[in-house]
Image (cartoon, rainbow, N blue to C red):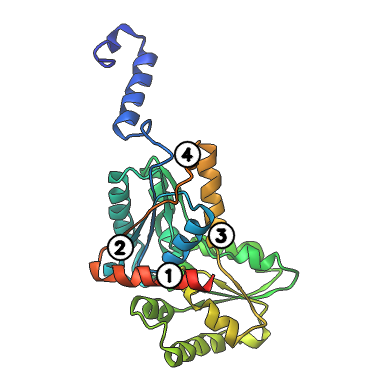
Amino acid sequence: NIAKHASKFEDLDVFFIRCIIEKMKKGAFCMNSKNPIGVFDSGLGGISVLHTMHSLLPNENLIYLGDSKYNPYGTKTKEEITKRCIAICDEFIKQDVKAIVIACNTATSACVKLLRDKYDVDIIGMEPALKVACDRGSNQRIAVWATELTLSEKKFANLMDRFKDEHHIVKVPCPKLVRMVEDDKLDDTNLVESVLKEYLAACDYKKLDSIVLGCTHFPFYTKYLERLCPNIHIIEGSVGTTLHTKDLLEQKGLLNRSDEIGSITWMNTMESKIELSKRLFKMLEVEA
Ligand code: DGL
């Protein structure tokens, strides 16, 4: 109807009305604080972020989508990863999410900007929490554990440029740590410890102040690392990401203020990984 009467208005009014209709089509004005937040990762790693979100924002409804069928992202090209991220975000938009959290450093490095340009909802990305490690003091010795793609992308090079003159920073790609989570190997103590020792040796760990876990699959190894190297600070970014999400939702009046505990909806491009997803989530609850 508005469009039918548009001819009565000045050009500028018509333009604004068209914009409003476009936004209405995209559901922008139907957004409600009870709408879910979509959280995704290349697989099961983002469950470490999902767990922090559910602990700090317990009233939010969350949808977790793991892309295990296409895991790992860390050794794929930017183009391949971008294609997968668009497919996932399209699915979230269909489900009327009020925000999307990319619970994956690799996907963030590959295409966060493109996703922000493409979609109307807030998109929250992740990057290795290097600043947190550097803020601990002067002349810090830091290892950043992440995927090959995260460590070789421009986004990380820019981050490193801010700190590399004042601190000693080493980059360690750790693909096996992604694989072992996806393959349900976290209880295999011998295997896990031998792989962790390999990566610790690669960064001369005895001299380190901290290890930054720059991949969301890695917080599942925190307990192991605390045992293997108790003097090293283990830093990960899920709390920062959650608080940032909270701020953005608050600014838009979209924080869920209900008293009820929010729901978690589990999705995975490999149906058989849902049971393992729930187990990993429980494991973090027990450890917390
Ligand atoms: N969990 C992902 C990250 O935070 C990537 C793992 C992968 O698929 O290689 O970077």
The percent position of residue 37, horizontal first and vertical second, equals 40, 49
**Depth order, front residue of 196/246:** 246
**Gap between marks 4 and 3, in whole Å?**
19 Å
Answer above or below: position of 108 versus 164.
Answer: above
Residue identifier under label 2: 80
Mark number displayed over residue 282: 1
Secondary structure found at label 1: helix
Find out whether the residues at labels 2 and 3 contact each other: C-beta distance under 8 Å. no
Label 4 or label 3, whichever comes before in sequence order: 3
- Residue 254 is labelled as 4
Residue 194 percent across, percent down from the top left:
47, 92
Kind of residue sitting beneath label 4: Leu
Tell me the SS state at disc 2: helix
The residue under the point 33% across, 42% down is: 96
Mark 1 or 2, closer to the camera: 1
Of residues 255 and 28, the one drawn nearer to the viewer in this rendering: 255
In the image, what residue type sits under mark 2?
A: Glu
